C-alpha cells in the first residue's frame, strides 16, 4: 500500500519528468497570470456592486451544499499535495545529495527545504507539486464569490490576499524560488485543517468557541516569518540561494499581508472585547437559564470568520 502510494505521488513518470514550460504547462505565462487576476478582481467587484444595488445587505442568497462541497474538495486536494510533496521532497533529497556536495551551498536536508542550490531548474517531483499547488489556488478564489453571495461582504484584505497568493505561487515556479517546498508543506497542512473545519461547520456540526481559522492563520504567518530569517541566514552564510530576487519580492508582499492581517486581528479582538463588555454590563437580574444561553451565544460570537 505504502509503496503504491509513493509510486503514484512521487515516482510516476509524469511527476519525475515534469518541467515547468511556457509552451507545455497550462497557466504558465505572464499574460495568463495577469489576465486571470484581472478577471477575478473585475468579476468580484462587479458581482458585489450588482448585488448591493438589487438586494438588501441582510438578504442572503442560498447556495445549498456548494460551499460545503468546495471546502471538502480544497481540504482533500491540500492533503494530497501535502503528502505528495513530502514524498517527493524525500525522493529529491535522496537523488540530489551528490549535487549538494559539488555546489557546497547546502549540506543537510533542512537547509535544502529553505535554500535551493544555485542553478536549480523548475523540473522534477517537487516542482510538479508546486505546479499543482499553483493550480489549486484558482479553486480558492471561488470562496470570495461564496462570501459575497451569502454575506454581501468584500474586503480589500481578502481581495489582495487571494490575488497575491496566486501571484506568489506563480513566482515560485517561474524563478525556482528557495523556501517554496517548506512554504507549500505549511500552507497545505493549514488548508487541509481549516477547510476540513469549514466543511465540518457547513454541514451543521458545532463550531469552536474561539476564532479557529484566524488562529491557524496566525500560526502559518509566524512559521513563515521565522523561516524567512532562515533563508536570509543561509543565503549569506552558504554563498547564495536560488531565486532570491523572487524571494525578496515575495517577502515584501508577505510583509504587506502581515500588516493587513495584524490590522484585522487587532480589530477582531477589539470587537470581541466590546461584545464581552456589553455582556458583562447586561442586567444581572437575568436567570441562570438566560446566563447559559448567553454563554452559548458567546461561543458563536467568538468564532469570528476570517474569509
Image (cartoon, rainbow, N blue to C red):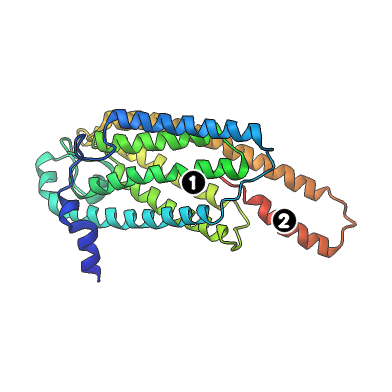
Please give the name of the residue rendered at 80% of the width and 50% of the height, measured from the top-left corner. Answer: 280
Residue 297 is labelled as: 2
Which tag is nearer the camera, tag 2 or tag 1? 2
Q: Position of residue 109 (x, y in %)?
A: 23, 50
Looking at the image, how many numbered discs can be counted on the residues? Answer: 2
User: Left or right: 278 with respect to 38?
Assistant: right
Quadrant assignment for the N terminus? bottom left
N-terminal-most mark, 2 or 1 = 1
Task: Specify few, some or many for label 2: CA neighbours under 10 Å numbering under 14, 14-19, or 20 or more.
Answer: few
Q: Residue furthest bottom?
A: 1
Q: Residue furthest front?
A: 54
User: Left or right: 225 with respect to 155?
Assistant: left
Please give the name of the residue rendered at 54% of the width and 34% of the height, measured from the top-left corner. Answer: 47
| Residue situated in front as seen by the camera: 171 or 263 | 171
User: Left or right: 281 with respect to 17?
Assistant: right
Q: Residue furthest right?
A: 285
Residue 217 is labelled as: 1
Q: Image height check: is 157 above or below 114?
A: above
Residue 183 visible somewhere in the drawing: no
Q: Position of residue 271 (x, y in %)?
A: 68, 41
User: Left or right: 21 with respect to 150?
Assistant: left
Quadrant assignment for the C terminus? top right
- Determine which quarter of the picture holds residue 141: top left
Residue 106 is labelled as: none
For mark 2, give the secondary structure: helix
As measured in the structure, the alpha-carbon distance from the residue carrying label 2 to the one carrying label 1 is 24 Å
Residue 53 visible somewhere in the drawing: yes
Q: Position of residue 232 (x, y in %)?
A: 31, 34
Q: Position of residue 2 (x, y in %)?
A: 25, 69
> Are discs 2 and 1 less than 8 Å apart at CB?
no
Amino acid at each position: 500500500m505504502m509503496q503504491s502510494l509513493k509510486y503514484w505521488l512521487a515516482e510516476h513518470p509524469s511527476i519525475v519528468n515534469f518541467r515547468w514550460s511556457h509552451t507545455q504547462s497550462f497557466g504558465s505565462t505572464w499574460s495568463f497570470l495577469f489576465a486571470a487576476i484581472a478577471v477575478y478582481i473585475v468579476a468580484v467587484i462587479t458581482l458585489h456592486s450588482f448585488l448591493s444595488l438589487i438586494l438588501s445587505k441582510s438578504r442572503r442568497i442560498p447556495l445549498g451544499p456548494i460551499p460545503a462541497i468546495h471546502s471538502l474538495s480544497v481540504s482533500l486536494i491540500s492533503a494530497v499535495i501535502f503528502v505528495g510533496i513530502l514524498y517527493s521532497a524525500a525522493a529529491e533529497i535522496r537523488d540530489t545529495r551528490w549535487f549538494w556536495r559539488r555546489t557546497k551551498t547546502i549540506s543537510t536536508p533542512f537547509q535544502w527545504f529553505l535554500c535551493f542550490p544555485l542553478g536549480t531548474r523548475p523540473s522534477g517531483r517537487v516542482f510538479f507539486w508546486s505546479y499543482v499547488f499553483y493550480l489549486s489556488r484558482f479553486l480558492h478564489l471561488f470562496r470570495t464569490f461564496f462570501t459575497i453571495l451569502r454575506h454581501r461582504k468584500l474586503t480589500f484584505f481578502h481581495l489582495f490576499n487571494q490575488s497575491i497568493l496566486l501571484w506568489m505561487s506563480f513566482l515560485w515556479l517561474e524563478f525556482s524560488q528557495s523556501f517554496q517546498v517548506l512554504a507549500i508543506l505549511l500552507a497545505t497542512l493549514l488548508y487541509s485543517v481549516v477547510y476540513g473545519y469549514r466543511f465540518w461547520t457547513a454541514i451543521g456540526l458545532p463550531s469552536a468557541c474561539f476564532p479557529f481559522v484566524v488562529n491557524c492563520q496566525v500560526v502559518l504567518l509566524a512559521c513563515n516569518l521565522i523561516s524567512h530569517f532562515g533563508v536570509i541566514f543561509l543565503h549569506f552564510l552558504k554563498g547564495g540561494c536560488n531565486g532570491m530576487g523572487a524571494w525578496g519580492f515575495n517577502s515584501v508582499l508577505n510583509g504587506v499581508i502581515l500588516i493587513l492581517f495584524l490590522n484585522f486581528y487587532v480589530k477582531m479582538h477589539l470587537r470581541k472585547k466590546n461584545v464581552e463588555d456589553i455582556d458583562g454590563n447586561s442586567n444581572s437580574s437575568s436567570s441562570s437559564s438566560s446566563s447559559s444561553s448567553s454563554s452559548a451565544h458567546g461561543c458563536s460570537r467568538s468564532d469570528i470568520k476570517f474569509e
